[in-house]
Every structure is written in C-alpha cells, then in structure tokens.
Image: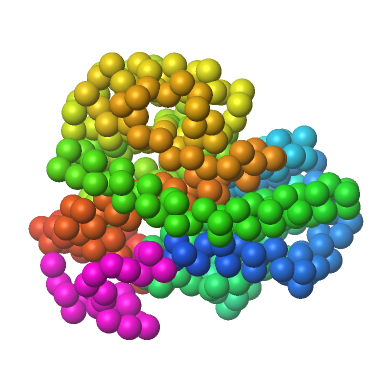
Amino acid sequence: MDLAKLKAKFPNGELRQSHPFYMADAIQDIPGCLEACLADDVLALLQKALSGIQPQRIFTVGCGTSYNAAQAAAYACQTQLGIPAIACDAYDFELDLPPGVDSQALVISISQSGQSLTTCLAQEKARSLGAMTVGISGKPDSRLAQNAAFALTDPYLIEIPFGKTRSYLSSALLGMLTGMMTAAPAQQDAFILQARAMAALLRQNMQYWEQSGRSVAAGWTGRTCHYILAGFGAQQANAAEIGLKFIKVLGESATSFGLEEFTHGPNASFRKDMGIVLFQTDERTLEKAVRIAQGTALSQAALVVITSQANAGWPQTAWKIEIPQLDPQPLSLFPAAVAAQYLLYFLAIAKGMNPDINGHDFHPELGDIYDSFFPPGTH
C-alpha cells in the first residue's frame, strides 16, 4: 500500500489512523446535512426553478452510488406523485435513450463530483431534447452544474474523503425534493414536514445505531467475508448502495437483491462465512421478510435485520437493529442507511482496516485500476 498516494486523497488533513475516522464524521454529519437540504432558502430556489413544471414522467440518472441515490429518488417520485419515474444508469441512458425524454419529462442527474462523464453526457442529451434538467452535485462549478437547467449543490459540498457516505443520502433527498416540488403546494408542504421530522429522528437515534453497529460487527468479526443484502422499494436502493460499500471498503464480495429475488437461488451460497443484511420497513412486505429471515436462520449464515418492526417474530439467532416507522415509506431509506453504514464502519475497524481507504488499496498487485477505468477529468 502506497501511503504517500493514500495521503494525497486527504487534502484537508492527515490520514487518520484510529477511530473516529473520516467516515465516522460523515455519518455523524448526515442529520445536519439533510436539515440543510431542507432549509427554506434551498426549497425556495427549487420551487422557483420548477414553478409551472408539471412533468408527465421523471427520469433519474447516475452511476455507482449516485445511481443508487437515483433509484431511491425515482421510487419516491413514483409512489408519491403517481407518475412514471425511472432510474437509469447514465451510460445506458446515453447509449440507449429510454422513450419519453422530451419536453414533458423531468430529468434529475446526480454526480457528487459533478464530473462523471457519462452522467454529464446523459444530462446534456436530455436537455437537447427539451427535457427539464436538474443536476445534483457537490460542486457548483462542475460540468454537471454548469450545463443543467437548474443546479442543486450539496450544502456540505464534496465529502472528505471522497467516500460518498453522507452524500449518498443528501443526493437522494435532493432528488426526492426535486420531484416533490412539481406536486401541489399542500403535498409539497406535507412531504417537507415529514422529511424534517425524519431528520430530527436521525439525531435522536444516532448513538443507538452506533452501538448496534459495534455490537453486530463484533459478532461478525472473524466470521463473515461474503455478503448478501436485500430489501424492497427504497430499501432495495439501500441494499445496492451498502452492498457496493461492502465491496469498496472491505474488498470482499457482496451482492444485493430485491426481496423477491432473494428467494430465487441465493440461498445456495449460504455458508457460515456469509453475512446477510435484510432491510425491512414496508408493512406490506413484513410477512415475506419474516419468512425469509426464518428460512435464513436454518442455515449457518449470519443475519442482521434492520427493521421498523422489531417484535415481528424474527428468529432469535438474528441480530436486530430497530429504526422508526416513517410515513411516507421512501423516508425510511435514511435511518436504515445510517444503521447499515455504522455496521460497515465498525466491521472494517474490527477487520483491521481503515474505513476511509478503499479495499483495493490494500492490494497493490491490482495496479492502478481506477486510473485505467477513469482517465483524468472523467469522474
């Protein structure tokens, strides 16, 4: 591992060597950042930009973590507005443009750096076709921001290090708010009120989720090295995002599934070195989720359930992390993500890793893969 190269990733200070690492700071910053996203001045600008816009369809676009935030935003827009909302990988959007990208469409593009080339190209293509484009990034002078019809900047700007722990959730919330600002004023106000209540609940529960993450990580240490994550609706976006972070931070394999897909084959991989994270917050899926958990308990796999229904008959062998029951459902994304981020954070520490360093940095034999994938200026 090239320590000098790693330190270059931390322009605002030295690479930390013990808890709290920068990732812990990023998690702790989530409530304040979400509250800043919901500030009156931010909402007023967004309302003004979208005044008179009544889209017939919404597309959310991104890559990697930003795509997972786009999935969460699309789910919220579709369920709350009652119009089609589709999350698209930016590369797919650019090469195989989905039907309906026109003057009646709202296209919400997400890139924390604002420089992800495929996302920028996708947004520019959408705007050339007459769609209303909103670009969400951490840099107001980025290409994405400069070329959007309206730019939204993460109020806490670029995350240091560039791990996208906090900004996954701020991007998701800004995407949700963008769609909701095309609704009737009463619906806008109700959603904002509920989102602010959610941010307050995050503040109240941070210590509990930190302690729960420590506890589960201690139980999994020396046991798990492969992971499966599953959820429904907004929680499917969390499964995808936290699974991606398991891969990037731990350098270990992880796969995410929708709740139904989880029952169609993955159990063949259940071993005692498998860690399973099940997200459950939608009452409609409670019976299925409990049944899945009970089936998983028959194996030797380690199971944690992040749930708003802690007394729903989960197996005794499962770890349980409780989160508040929220309405509307898409807002459950945020507490569930924080709980899972703490688990990942303490699991990395328990494995002797620095959670601020991507897992591939521990394996110099892999070479400089990142620079090959992303030439300078493209990400």
* Main SS, magenta residues: loop
- Residue 164: percent from the left, percent from the top? 44, 61
Quarter of the image for the C terminus: give it: bottom left
- Can residue 129 be seen here? The reply is no
Q: In percent of the image, x 31 and y 51: which residue is there?
A: 214
Q: What's drawn in magenta, residue-wise?
A: 1-25
Number of numbered discs visible in the structure rendering: 0
Quadrant for residue 35, please give it.
bottom right
- Residue 59: percent from the left, percent from the top? 65, 45
- Can residue 196 be seen here? The reply is yes
Q: Judge left or right: residue 310 versus residue 317.
A: right
**Residue nearer the viewer, 372 or 367:** 367
Above or below, comparing residue 361 to residue 6 in the picture: above
Quarter of the image for the N terminus: give it: bottom left
- Residue 108: percent from the left, percent from the top? 65, 54
Q: Is residue 20 magenta?
A: yes
- Residue 194: percent from the left, percent from the top? 72, 50
